[in-house]
Image: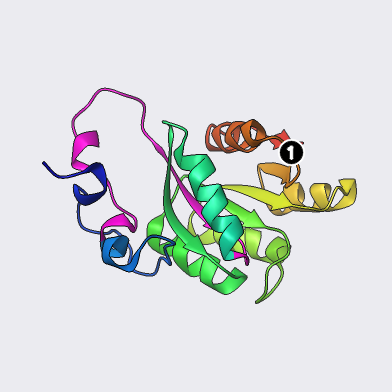
Amino acid sequence: MASPATRRLAPRCATVRSVARPAARAHRQCCSTVADAGRDRPALIDVVIADDHAMVRAGLRLLLEASPQIRVVGEAGGVASALSVIRGCSPRAAILDLDMPGGSTLAAIPHVLESCPGVAVVVLTMEEDATLAGEAMAAGARAYVLKDAADAELIAAVTAAAAGRTYVT
C-alpha cells in the first residue's frame, strides 16, 4: 500500500523548491492527495512559505503541516521567487518574511494580490514595530506575526487570514 506522500496527484506548479528528499520532491510539490478527494470535510488551506532561510522554511513546514487544516504547497527563498511560486500555485494564504533578498516584501504585497486576488498575505517578521505592521496591513496583508510568537499564533493567523479576518501579534 502506498504511503500518503506517494499517493499524490500530478503537481499543479513546477516552480516550487521543496525541502523534501530529492526522490520524493516530485510528489510533494503543489499536490492534492488521492485520500483527500471526494471526502466531506473543510477545504484545506493551501499555503506558500517564503523565507530566505531554508531551516526556517523547513520548521514552518513542519509546524503548519501538523495542523489538519493546512497544506504547504510551495516554498520560496526570496521576493521574486515568492511571486513566481504564488502565481503558479494560487494558494489561499502566503506567509512572507518581511526581510528577504530580491526586493521589498512590503512593495511585493500589492503585486501578490494583483496576480492572485484571493490569496491572504501573512507577514512573518522579527520586527516588533507598529509602523511596519501598519504599512504591511495598508499594503494588503491580512496578518502580521512576530517570529517569536507561539506556534499556535501562526496557525491562528493563517486560519484567520484565509477566512478574511485580520490578525496581528
| Rendering quarter of residue 4 | top left
Of 77 and 107, which appears nearest the observer?
Answer: 77
> Is 35 above or below relative to 121?
above
37 magenta-colored: yes
Residue extending furthest toward the left: 1
User: Can you give x and y, in whole percent of width and height, for residue 101 in the image?
Assistant: 67, 74
Side of 57 where 105 appears, left or right? right
The answer to whether residue 79 is magenta is no
Residue type, mark 1 in image = Ala
Residue under the point 26% across and 59% down: 11
**Depth order, front residue of 139/121:** 121
Question: Which residue is depicted at the point 44% across and 62% down?
Answer: 19
Q: Which residue is mark 1?
A: 149
From the viewer's perspective, tell me whether residue 87 is left or right of residue 148.
left
Image quarter hosting the C terminus? top right
Q: Which segment is the magenta one?
A: 27-53
Q: How is the image coloured?
A: rainbow
Task: Indicate the position of residue 132 as horizontal and vertical percent values.
Answer: 83, 53
The x, y position of residue 160, in whole percent, is 59, 31
- Taking 7 as reference, is 73 left or right? right
- SS at mark 1 in the image: loop
